[in-house]
């Protein structure tokens, strides 16, 4: 019995020593070979290996099926890369409902600042207000929002650009003739403002009549179709103003197919590469040059200034110029 008792005491002593060396009496989970997950802070972003948080900006673009907005995206991306910040780009493909959903996704990702190029200036208000509620600053680029709280708006003066186009047309046709207007997406601030400037220049000018103003949604294929219809209804027009170059190039295609390229001049807006080439070749009369890459760059730089505690202007203008042969 004494031998058994001594054996039990020895076993108990070994067990107590093992418990003390483990730091407690609970079971131990085997260490994981994976590093612990890192999460961004309340304002969004990701943690770098050094523990610093990366700034994340969201860019909601109306469509990347238009070279103008591809340039805008590229300008923003270059500025983000230069500053070492992350840029998340969403393409709404000209669908207002899709853009609202994409902005909600960016809000869920807790981006630090939202840059929005609205598909529709009225429809986007819901998305802007959602960002306001989440405490995420909003900057609009090229097109504005008709509601919600916006930190800054980066854009050209579209009214002035439309007026430049109208004044050039009046000059080129000698103040006489019928004009057609291809409008952008109804509800987009750029369409509204460019149309307003254009009509400031041509309305009330004796001898000039705007016989057709029809939307072609900033789209080249629609510009072609709408122009074909206008030519049938108004065969005597002498000039066309399109709210962007994509529609202008579509209209030009219809005019050339009808054999009227020497009778009808076309003026566009944006100075995309295809439009500038058409101007250089003498196929288009002119285009109003915006600087989309500059818009993208200024949008990102404005966001970073705000995050750095600097004050920013509510309106940040981007210069315009008229491109002619």
Image: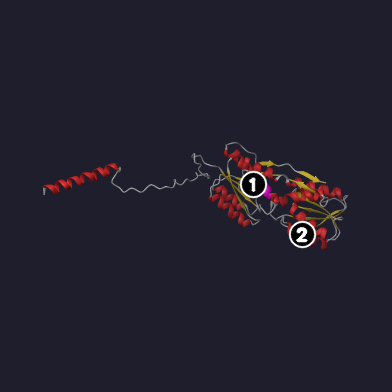
Q: Secondary structure at mark 2?
A: helix
N-term mark: 1 or 2: 1
Asked if one can make out residue 142 in the rendered structure from this viewpoint, the answer is no
Q: Could you tell whether 53 is left or right of 257 in the image? A: left
Q: Badges 1 and 2: C-beta atoms under 8 Å apart?
A: no
Q: Is residue 71 magenta?
A: yes
Task: Depth check: give the residue in front, 126 or 24.
Answer: 24
Position of residue 42 measured from the top left corner of the image (x, y, whole percent): 50, 44
The magenta region covers: 69-74
Query: According to the image, label 2 marks what residue?
Result: 224
Local crowd at mark 1 within 10 Å, few (<14), some, or many (≥20)? many
Label ID, residue 140: 1
* Vertical side of 202 occupied by 298: above or below: above
Q: Residue 246 appears in which quarter of the rendering?
A: bottom right
Q: Residue 322: x and y, percent? A: 79, 45
The rendered magenta stretch, by its main secondary structure, is classed as helix
Q: Is residue 232 among what the camera can see?
A: yes
Horizontal side of 31 relative to 290 (left or right) equals left
Q: Does the stretch in magenta take in 155? A: no
Instruction: Classify 52 as above or below 106.
Output: above
- Marks 1/2: CA distance? 30 Å
- Label 1 secondary element: strand
Q: Position of residue 19 (x, y in %)?
A: 27, 44
The residue most toward the top is: 310
Colour treatment of the image: secondary structure
Mark 2 Cα shell of 10 Å, populated few (<14), some (14-19), many (≥20): many
């Amino acid at each position: 019995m004494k031998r058994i008792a001594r054996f039990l005491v020895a076993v108990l002593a070994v067990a107590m020593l093992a418990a003390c060396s483990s730091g407690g009496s609970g079971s131990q989970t085997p260490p994981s070979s994976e590093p612990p997950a890192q999460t961004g802070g309340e304002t969004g972003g990701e943690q770098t290996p050094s523990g610093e948080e990366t700034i994340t900006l969201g860019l909601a673009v109306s469509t990347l099926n238009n070279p103008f907005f591809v340039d805008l995206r590229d300008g923003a991306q270059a500025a983000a890369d230069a500053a070492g910040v992350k840029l998340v780009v969403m393409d709404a493909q000209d669908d207002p409902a899709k853009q609202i959903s994409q902005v909600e996704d960016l809000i869920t990702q807790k981006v630090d600042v939202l840059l929005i190029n609205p598909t529709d200036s009225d429809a986007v208000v819901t998305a802007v207000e959602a960002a306001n509620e989440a405490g995420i600053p909003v900057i609009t680029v090229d097109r504005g929002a008709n509601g919600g709280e916006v930190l800054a708006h980066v854009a050209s003066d579209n009214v002035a650009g439309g007026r430049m186009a109208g004044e050039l047309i009046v000059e080129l046709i000698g103040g006489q003739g019928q004009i057609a207007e291809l409008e952008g997406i109804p509800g987009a601030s750029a369409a509204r403002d460019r149309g307003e400037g254009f009509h400031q220049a041509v309305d009330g000018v004796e001898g000039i009549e705007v016989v057709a103003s029809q939307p072609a949604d900033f789209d080249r294929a629609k510009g072609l179709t709408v122009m074909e219809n206008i030519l049938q209804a108004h065969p005597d027009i002498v000039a066309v103003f399109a709210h962007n170059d994509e529609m202008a190039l579509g209209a030009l295609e219809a005019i050339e197919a009808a054999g009227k390229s020497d009778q009808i001049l076309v003026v566009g807006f944006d100075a995309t590469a295809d439009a500038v080439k058409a101007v250089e070749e003498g196929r288009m009369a002119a285009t109003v040059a915006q600087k989309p890459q500059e818009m993208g760059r200024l949008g990102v730089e404005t966001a970073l200034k705000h995050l750095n505690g600097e004050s920013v202007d509510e309106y940040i203008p981007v210069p315009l110029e008229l491109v002619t042969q």
